[in-house]
């Protein structure tokens, strides 16, 4: 019975619902030593001295390490595959602890104690003396001459600048009769806010350093821990249990190297570092705040004569994933709305803020905000209907990107729009809501996005899979692409069951935990790649195992392999449909046969040299309470074409999660820093306005299922795309309701108050004095 | 793991008073939804705690013989919201405390803790001020009562003397009788948030519902402690129930309040919201009182 395409229950549902599932902290022995990081209280400076004398007096303190104790081995943290070409390697700018502190909250010292209370008490008593340096928080200000320099190797603070040039922009803008739309858009720094903070513990065993970590990328962490410690990579063993979310923050090496190094300094004793929420906000990773300057020259019919895109990406203090995010954002513009004359520039700039890294969408929520807001602004300028404009000017069917070789095979955009229009009654409402008056108004808006699946050809793409047959005809399945809550393990079980002809996906026992000593090498969970890339390795490895099973079946049945198939866990003769032997009986025979005993297993690597476009749209209907400066989302729908759905219910859940993140991005989330001191102001879940259940309507998801030709299962990216189009859709609805637009995220009461005041919708006579 | 130096469990109010006298440095803990957070963030790390959480005698809502409503200090928010006496006589208080945090916090958090914490943003505080609640404190010399406006001395400081614990909050009969109120919590999220502005209004209309006999308004987060807006109240008392009067009243609150300009919200936004909230609260209160606007 086919599993793929059915909403089967998650393989981990029971364990997670009953609390049996074990996460990193559940697995750590209670006698672990506790580490707490002492953080800088200046935004930029040089540590002159660290006085630990008082802190050492706290009963229970074991050791205190400072930035003067750590090895001089800079290491990279980005969760990218290692590149054997030096030019493509990630920037190694991190130390275990830092003498040159570059943001408020940087790692200066680490206290190790017998318990959390002693560690916290001692951490408060560590006295650090700094030579303070001037700091800069804004990316464009950091590019100005004379700005404080964060890294010696980058005197202008520009980590990287890339350009795209196509046609002749300067000549094209001289065409008579063009309308110029020239605007700036800004996005906020936000954080992932996964429910389980980053946590890792380390111990030595059998001559190895074992690190158990809440990470998305165990095999990559193994490499970076090796690099940071100067230890051969094979001596590092990383174990990844279930994790409580990552959203890209855990696609970075965080505190695994520090906890491993401390463990080594203490003779291999078990050491745990559980990052508090406040530190998670500031000292893990954040989403890049990207500021965009978009200039479009359009003809009266809306077609593009020329476009220019400039974007400034705030990297924060350390390189992490660096320019990859800005480059991806920039690359989307000429593809989504093609234009013959295009100039694009992206700068990724160091500032004294928290380091930005990967976060669900990897530059695309930012680019979708700027890009889709800009399309709406063009529509306003030329009097076009925003949906009709998109249908006319988005990438046409058959469009092929020269670099990725991605192709738009189907009329996906129009199919998604059609579905959204129908479900949301968009066009009628959009017309009806125009020109309302009164304090409380309704609006509806739509936006789309551009997305790729996985990282080829920018980076390595492959997947390795191991399948092991059990005596009862079930199998174990292992891959390196991690379950991080998204439901990947279930999709793997469904795909494997179908490839092998198993009766039930529950006959595929997915080993959820990755252990770099045991699990086949794989790169982890990121880039909305897991189902897509593991699909290849499951199809290939499953075919190998199936061939071995049928060969063995031939031995015991004498039926030629060509006339057999595995159907519902039986070996079936295809000519007449007769069941020759059950897979269970075959497996038992293979294990224990006195004539030919063999353990039937298969393992293979598939290198993927493909990528796939994934598209969709969001439609949001809102109520705007103008005097209260509030937007309430009443109805919201995302429509996605992510190819064939492996598990519709899990796909829907993926979309819901992304939409929730998108609503927070649109309306409330923003990390703030004090301009005077560089201190983070709201690094806690009270002051950082992560949206709650009470801020969402019922989230709706719908799908268009065009099979992806490059995938064995017809599937492509869905993990990240849902977060991308939500904010611009809500902004379009705000415009529909009030005629007012906001260009800087978030559209929270503070920004709406300013926008409504400026537009004359709010009039406080007492403020005019 | 919390950094607690010592922990004393009270067995009775008298026991709590004795513990307070014996350990003057110790902090009182009820539900812990504020105290434990402050201990975790280091502000109260390493303190001694006197728990009063087991004192069931301080739980519940009842009518005193003179008709005053008595709310035991340990009564949880969810208890208050669900209580039939609250729903009958001072529904707005039940609604206000139903906006605290989330369900778990409302189950553990108490109205005594909410007020003893002394913060301006407490969701119960503006309504208690608007109803001229009376705070009962019990100490070595027995119980004393004082108006809630005198209980709040300054930001995070309330009038609790050595050996005392807060044992009840009372709403006088004349305060709630024929009186209808409404509370608006203005926050950046619809749950798990602290008010950017809290506005509680209650009105008593004339028998023909045409005149405001009594109007009281109190704010949270409009100054360092919860506060009434007496100028505005005076401007509306005795006036006809008209939209024009309501709008004038709302603007007048600016004469009384003094919200902060901070990164959490600008003074301009807070003032704007305070005026709009005052207007909406009066409109809703009038509706509840059976009046027409």
Image (cartoon, coloured by chain):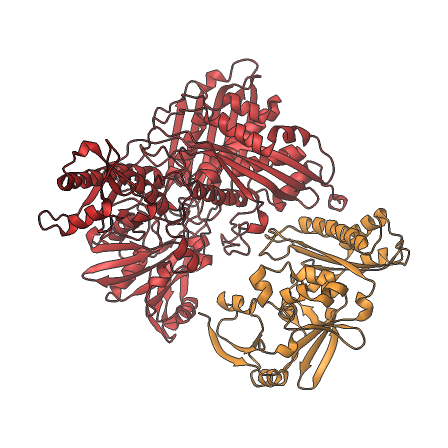
Chain colours: A red, B orange
The number of numbered badges drawn on the structure is 0
Q: Nearer the viewer, residue A215 or A711?
A: A711
Name the quadrant containing residue A625: top right
Residue projecting furthest to the left: A595
Name the quadrant containing residue A283: bottom left
Residue A224 in the image, given as x and y percentages of width and height: 28, 50
At x 26%, y 51%, the residue is A222
Relative horizontal placement of residue A668, taking residue A768 as reference (left or right): left
Relative horizontal placement of residue A259, taking residue A543 as reference (left or right): right
At x 56%, y 77%, the residue is B51
One can see residue A460 in this view: no
Residue A721 in the image, given as x and y percentages of width and height: 45, 37
Q: Nearer the viewer, residue B26 or A526?
A: A526
Residue A175, above or below A162: above
Relative horizontal placement of residue B218, taking residue A555 as reference (left or right): right
Q: Which quadrant of the rendered structure holds the C terminus of chain A?
A: top right
Residue projecting furthest to the top: A176
Residue A739 in the image, given as x and y percentages of width and height: 66, 32
Residue B47 in the image, given as x and y percentages of width and height: 51, 75
Residue A327, above or below B205: above
One can see residue A435 in this view: yes
Q: Which quadrant of the rendered structure holds the N terminus of chain A?
A: top left
Residue projecting furthest to the right: B208
């Amino acid at each position: 019975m086919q599993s793929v395409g059915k909403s089967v229950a998650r393989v981990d549902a029971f364990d997670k619902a009953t609390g049996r599932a074990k996460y990193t902290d559940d697995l750590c022995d209670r006698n672990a030593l506790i580490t707490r990081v002492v953080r800088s209280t200046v935004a930029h400076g040089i540590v002159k001295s660290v006085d630990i004398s008082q802190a050492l007096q706290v009963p229970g303190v074991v050791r205190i390490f400072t930035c003067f104790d750590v090895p001089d081995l800079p290491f990279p943290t980005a969760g990218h595959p290692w590149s054997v070409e030096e030019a493509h390697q990630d920037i190694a700018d991190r130390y275990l602890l830092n003498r040159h502190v570059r943001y408020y909250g940087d790692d200066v010292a680490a206290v190790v104690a017998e318990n959390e209370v002693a560690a916290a008490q001692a951490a408060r008593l560590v006295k650090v003396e700094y030579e303070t340096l001037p700091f800069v928080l804004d990316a464009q200000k950091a590019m100005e001459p004379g700005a404080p320099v964060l890294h010696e190797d980058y005197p202008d603070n520009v980590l990287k600048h890339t350009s795209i040039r196509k046609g002749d922009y300067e000549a094209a803008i001289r065409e008579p009769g063009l309308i110029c739309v020239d605007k700036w858009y800004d996005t906020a720094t936000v954080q992932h806010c996964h429910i389980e903070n980053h946590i890792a513990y380390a111990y030595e065993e059998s001559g190895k350093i074992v690190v158990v970590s809440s990470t998305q990328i165990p095999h990559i962490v193994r490499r970076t821990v090796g690099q940071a410690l100067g230890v051969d990579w094979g001596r590092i063993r990383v174990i990844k249990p279930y994790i409580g979310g990552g959203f890209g923050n855990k696609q970075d090496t965080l505190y695994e190297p520090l906890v491993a190094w401390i463990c080594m300094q203490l003779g291999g004793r078990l050491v745990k570092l559980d990052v508090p929420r406040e530190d998670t906000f500031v000292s893990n990773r954040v989403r890049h705040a990207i500021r965009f300057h978009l200039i479009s020259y359009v003809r009266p019919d809306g077609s593009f004569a020329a476009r220019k895109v400039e974007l400034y990406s705030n990297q924060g203090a350390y390189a992490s994933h660096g320019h990859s995010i800005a480059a991806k954002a920039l690359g989307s513009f000429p593809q989504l709305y093609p234009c013959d004359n295009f100039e694009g520039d992206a700068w990724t700039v160091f500032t004294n803020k928290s380091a930005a890294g990967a976060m669900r969408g990897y530059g695309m929520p930012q680019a979708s905000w700027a890009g889709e807001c800009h399309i709406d602004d063009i529509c306003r300028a030329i009097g076009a209907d925003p949906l009709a404009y998109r249908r006319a000017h988005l990438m046409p069917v058959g469009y092929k990107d020269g670099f990725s070789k991605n192709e738009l095979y189907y009329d996906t955009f129009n199919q998604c729009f059609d579905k959204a229009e129908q479900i949301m009654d968009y066009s009628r409402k959009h017309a009806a809501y125009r020109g309302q008056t009164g304090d409380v108004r309704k609006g509806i808006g739509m936006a789309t996005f551009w997305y790729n699946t996985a990282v080829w050809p920018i980076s390595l793409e492959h997947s390795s899979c191991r399948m092991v047959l059990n005596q009862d005809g079930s199998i174990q399945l292992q891959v390196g692409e991690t379950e991080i809550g998204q439901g990947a393990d279930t999709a793997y079980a469904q795909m494997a069951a179908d490839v092998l002809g198993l009766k039930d996906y529950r006959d595929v026992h997915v080993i959820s935990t990755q252990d770099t000593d045991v699990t086949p090498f794989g790169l982890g969970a990121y880039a909305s790649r897991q189902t897509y890339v593991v699909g290849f390795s499951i199809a290939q490895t499953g075919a190998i195992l199936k061939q071995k099973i049928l060969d063995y079946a031939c031995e015991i049945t004498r039926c030629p392999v060509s006339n057999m198939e595995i159907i519902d866990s039986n070996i079936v003769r295809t000519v007449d449909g007769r069941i020759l032997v059950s897979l269970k009986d075959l497996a038992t025979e293979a294990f224990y046969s006195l004539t030919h005993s063999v353990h039937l297993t298969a393992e293979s690597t598939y290198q993927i040299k493909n990528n796939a476009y994934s598209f969709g749209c969001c439609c949001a209907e809102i109520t705007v309470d103008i005097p209260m400066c509030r937007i309430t989302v009443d109805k919201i729908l995302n429509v996605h074409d992510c190819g064939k759905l492996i598990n519709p219910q899990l796909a829907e859940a993926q979309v819901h999660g992304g939409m929730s993140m998108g609503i927070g991005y649109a309306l409330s989330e923003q990390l703030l820093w004090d301009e005077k001191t560089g201190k983070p102001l709201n690094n806690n879940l009270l002051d950082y306005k992560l949206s709650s259940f009470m801020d969402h309507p019922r989230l709706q998801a719908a799908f268009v299922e065009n099979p992806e030709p490059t995938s064995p299962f017809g599937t492509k990216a869905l993990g990240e795309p849902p977060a991308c189009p939500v904010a611009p859709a809500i902004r379009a609805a705000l415009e529909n309701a009030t005629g007012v637009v906001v260009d800087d995220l978030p559209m929270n009461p503070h920004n709406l108050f300013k926008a409504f005041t400026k537009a004359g919708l709010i009039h406080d006579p007492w403020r005019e004095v | 793991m919390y950094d607690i130096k010592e922990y004393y469990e009270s067995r009775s109010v008298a026991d709590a008073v004795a513990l307070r006298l014996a350990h003057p440095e110790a902090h009182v803990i009820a539900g812990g939804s504020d105290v434990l957070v402050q201990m975790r963030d280091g502000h109260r790390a390493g303190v001694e705690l006197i728990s009063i959480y087991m004192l069931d005698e301080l739980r519940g809502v009842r009518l005193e013989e003179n008709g005053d409503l008595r709310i035991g200090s340990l009564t949880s928010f969810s208890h208050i919201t669900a209580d039939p006496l609250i729903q009958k006589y001072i529904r707005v208080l039940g609604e206000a405390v139903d906006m605290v945090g989330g369900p778990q916090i409302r189950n553990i958090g108490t109205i005594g803790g909410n007020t003893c914490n002394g913060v301006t943003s407490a969701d119960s505080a503006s309504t208690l001020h608007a109803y001229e609640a009376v705070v009962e404190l019990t100490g070595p010399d027995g119980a004393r009562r004082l108006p809630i406006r005198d209980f709040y001395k300054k930001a995070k400081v309330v009038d609790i003397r050595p050996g005392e614990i807060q044992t009840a909050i009372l709403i006088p009969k004349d305060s709630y009788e024929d009186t209808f109120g409404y509370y608006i919590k203005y926050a950046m999220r619809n749950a798990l948030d602290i008010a950017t502005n809290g506005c509680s209004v209650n009105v008593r209309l004339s028998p023909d519902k045409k005149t405001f006999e009594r109007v009281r308004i109190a704010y949270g987060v409009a100054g360092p402690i919860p506060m009434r807006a007496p100028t505005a109240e005076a401007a509306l008392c005795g006036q006809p129930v008209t939209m024009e009067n309501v709008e004038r009243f709302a603007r007048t609150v600016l004469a009384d309040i003094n919200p902060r300009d901070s990164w959490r919200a600008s003074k301009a936004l807070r003032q704007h919201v305070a005026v709009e909230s005052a207007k909406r609260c009066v409109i809703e209160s009038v509706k509840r009182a059976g009046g027409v606007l």
